[in-house]
Image: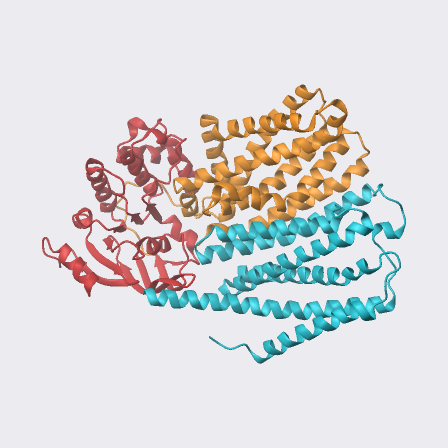
Amino acid sequence: MNRPQTTDHRPSSIVRRPSSGFLNAIGAIVWKDLAAELRSRELLSAMLVFALLVILIFNFALELDPLTRRVATPGILWATFAFAGTLGLNRSMAVEKDRGCLDGLLLAPVDRSAIYFGKTISNLAFMLIVEVVVLPVYSVLYNTNLFNPGLIVVILLGSVGYVAVGTLLSSMAVQTRTRDVLLPILLFPVVIPILIAAVKASSGFLQGLALTEVMPYINLLIVYDVIFTAVAYMVFDYVVEE
Amino acid sequence: MKPQPIVLKVLNVASVLLFLAALGMVFLYAPLEATMNYVQKIFYFHVANAWVGMLGFIAAAVAGVVYLIKHDQKWDIVELAAVEISLVFFIIAIVTGSIWARPSWGAYWTWEPRLTTAAILEMVYIAYLLLRQGLDDPDRRARFSAVYTLIGAISVPITFMSIRLFRTIHPVVIGTNSTASQGNFDMTSKMLATMFFALFTFSVIFVNLFWHRIRLGQLAQQVEQLKLEELQ
Amino acid sequence: MIAVKKLVKRFGLKTVLRGLDFEVQEGEFVALLGPNGAGKTTFLRILASLSRPTLGEVRVAGYLLPAQAAAVRRNLGVVSHLPLLYGELTAEENLRFYGRMYGVLELSQRINEVLELVGLTSRRRDLVRTFSRGMQQRLAIGRAILHDPDVLLFDEPHTGLDQDACDMLDRLLREVAGQGRTVVMTSHDLGRVEDLASRFDVLSRGGISASASRNGLGKNNLLDFYRQALAG
């Protein structure tokens, strides 16, 4: 059966294109998320306040004297990022689910993976914004210099892997009855490699270890990022399609 | 309801007999280890339990992948069966490991790579069961479970590697260098034979339990089906 | 325009649609009636490519589902009882976003046209969050026709609207349907669809149990027809 010819009776200003473009769709999703967030600042303010509270709690829980700080800083940073991250991931997906917008995205004639990559990039942007704010605040509060190019690379690599898995799992969690509590439970056991490698690499850079000693962890982060981005790309269809 | 197939019945009997034989070998045939004495006996079952846990882990991963390809509900039943068996046997392995660890390492728990990975795997399994609990639509439940099984199957080995990496760069400094303090010992050939017999026994037990659990899943599905037919 | 043959949809063991046949010619406005839980929404989600058919053949706008889903989606507009709009974006931004997702050319001009059509030009720079339910639903229609689709699917679009908003929505639905588009609309409110549709199909027990055109149906007979369809 051939596609029926439609007669030209509509005030149509548009010409159909064969496809709307993969990158264009990703760009549209990222633009939409950032524009909405720039206006409401709901998600970022929640993540930031939460991150600062976590740091505050660690301060009292660990009695962060200068000696402890040296050892504990990378761990505190990554625990903070991981906790604040789930908050953001949950919210970012809940926005799509609540008004049926996820269906709206799925109705668009683009490959489903465009939705995955779009959301992943938005989530990564939120995560990095939080990290960019947390780092100087932590530096000032604890008089620790965190401006280290190596550390920046580790944070970038760690965040990519965290968000790659987190976006996939949050789109699953949001479709369950227990959506408010499920994401961290699903996410934390499977991002442990990231947390181990990121903490070790961060502390390596902060203590000024030789690059050869830190490289195994950097490699591990890269491997994790590549594997899980690829896997999430392959299975995302199963998560959003019925 | 179909009766148990004859092979399954044979397996039931074989499991019991083999288990008794394995117990006999552990206590009567295998020699007493010099430094750890009777505590060392738990080693045979500890390894065998971990082995069954491992089999379940692999079976779950395979079932998950097959489900994603075939979209057949029966693989979801297989996957759940494998996860449940693996969950239980790894718990036993962790507990027996702790009993082993107390005299040889001086603590019930050490953050040793295998032990830690087993604990993290348990967390993955618990997350898996919570995920299933939160989903009502059986089709979606099966898809999400399979996806999560796949994610777990990839991340857990990486977790193990990263903990190992952390160990090789920072060697254990607490404790002495003697092999006993690491929990190692020289195995005699009789010990080795006992261990392999235990592994074989538990493999049979695994197959037997796995079969029963899959059958249970199928029966539960049939009950569900009958209920629906009754309603319509 | 829409051709469905022997469609079966199962959720796990539960069969919702059992061998449904359904055909819609170009330009028809079909009201899909039926009690709650009859599977209207499920059927519409299958037509919308959001849900896969378990068995059977589904063609929308000449393309096969789910194989040619992307081609179907390009020719399809959906309005559901949820607005599918982002509250933190303005009316214009929402349309701009969906326009980019569909790759609509000359988007700004098209957005102006659509906003004019749904009567929201003056509110174009206001956040959708501040809109009334009726306005949101009008904008949702604008979103659905933005890419000028041939087929429109409405899933209970009147849900949660007051009398005035309903009337306004009806005028708009008639207008977008009148432009030669093919429309399928689900509803359980006979009064609402009576004046809108050109054909009435009743979905019950997993299939289309009755079908009647407006011309074949005398005045005030819709309720009788519907009751008969459910009883028979």
In front here: C181 or B115? B115
The colour assigned to chain C within the rendered structure: red
B141 versus C136 height, above or below? below
Q: Quadrant of the N terminus of chain C?
A: bottom left
* Chain identifier, colour cyan: B
Q: Residue B218 at x, y = what percent?
A: 49, 68
Residue at image x 69%, y 21%? Answer: A142
Image side of residue C77 versus residue B155, left or right:
left
Colour chain A is painted in = orange
Q: Where does the image place residue C22, in percent across and percent down from the top left?
A: 28, 61
Q: Position of residue C66 (x, y in %)?
A: 42, 58
Residue C125 quadrant: top left
Residue A193 at what x, y percent from top left?
68, 44
A49 or C39: nearer the eye?
A: A49
Q: Foreground residue, B115 or C59?
A: B115
The C terminus of chain C sits in image quarter: bottom left
Residue C5 sits above or below residue C144 on the image: below
Q: Is residue A222 above or below residue B1?
A: above
Residue nearest the observer in this picture, B54 or C66: B54
Report if residue B72 is visible in the image.
Answer: no
Left or right: C45 in relation to C180? right
